Image (tube, helix red, strand yellow):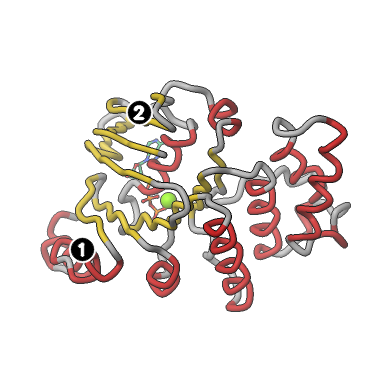
Amino acid sequence: MLEIRGLSVSFGGVHALSNISISIAPGRIYGLIGPNGAGKSTTINAITGTITPTRGSILWQGEDVSRRPQHWRARAGLARTFQNLALFQQLSVRENVTCGAIRMHRDEDLVATVDSALDDFGLGDIGDSPVSVLSLGTRKRVEMARAMVANPKLLLLDEPAAGLTGGEIDDFCTRVRSLKNRGSAVLLVEHDMNLVMSLCEHLYVLDFGKLIADGTPEEVRESPAVQAAYFGAEHDEQH
Ligand SMILES: Nc1ncnc2c1ncn2[C@@H]1O[C@H](COP(=O)(O)OP(=O)(O)OP(=O)(O)O)[C@@H](O)[C@H]1O
Ligand SMILES: [Mg+2]
């Protein structure tokens, strides 16, 4: 469904991504992990169109979309959440969630679709509250609802569990598994290794903008390159 080939992204002299290749199939949960600054958010930004790659191709259902605008990609089935949340703070919960659905439905369907998403995410009672007054966990739930109301084929999640309580993390896992069960794919960027190991079926590991390993969680855990990136002296010397 998604084929990234030889993707490189540079910001001036910083090589945020160097020649990475990633494949994503429907109905599977993928993890994208790596130390701080490894290039994880940059990968999501390139896939969804917030940045333009320096080199390489991003094939989405067979078509190179690497120069397509963000809204085109959203409409084609790519949805995301942001590491630092990107909600409209002064708008209500309902208005924020509506933003995710607005391109997807005819007007008469829109209200019903948003209402049902608000109920599904336990946001029905606070639909009229401005986002700015909500807790971090609730704001993250609003962002997830905004992404999911578009009924994405691939949902890209940038550190969705950071700052959540145990109960909120359990709820999050249930939602991710339900997406998989209806045939969507998920790419999860996350530092919480317990969460990554329990949810993901396949992992990609980045370090200094390079893909250093990919495979099942067990394969990746055993990889010497991954162990060096996370714990090794070799890695410290590169810093
Ligand atoms: N817009 C930008 N302009 C300049 N440099 C950038 C930009 N975005 C990212 N970078 C740099 O690219 C590299 C990769 O950053 P990225 O945010 O993708 O890392 P990350 O793996 O998401 O890290 P973290 O786990 O801390 O979120 C870093 O060196 C970062 O400073
Ligand atoms: Mg990041």
Image position, residue 45 (x, y; %): 45, 38
Q: Position of residue 43 (x, y in %)?
A: 38, 42
Label at residue 53: 2
> Dot 2 surroundings within 10 Å: few (below 14), some, or many (20 or more)?
many
Measuring 47% from the left and 53% from the top, which residue is drawn there?
Answer: 27
How far across and down, in percent of the image, does residue 88 sit?
72, 43
**Which disc, if any, is residue 169?**
none
The correct choice, above or below, for 164 with respect to 110 in the image is below
Q: Secondary structure at mark 2?
A: loop
Quarter holding the C terminus is bottom left
Q: The N terminus is located in which quarter? A: top left
Horizontal arrangement in the rendering, residue 161 relative to residue 3 (left or right):
right
> Ligand 1 lies in which image quarter?
top left
Q: Is residue 186 left or right of residue 135?
A: left
Packing grade of label 1 (10 A; few <14, some 14-19, many >=20) is many
The earlier-in-sequence mark between 1 and 2 is 2
Which residue is depicted at the point 45% across and 56% down? Answer: 188
Q: Secondary structure at mark 1?
A: helix
Pointer 1: what residue?
226
Residue at coordinates 70% horizontally, 54% vertically from top-left? 142
Can you give x and y, in whole percent of width and height, for residue 80 in the image?
A: 55, 45
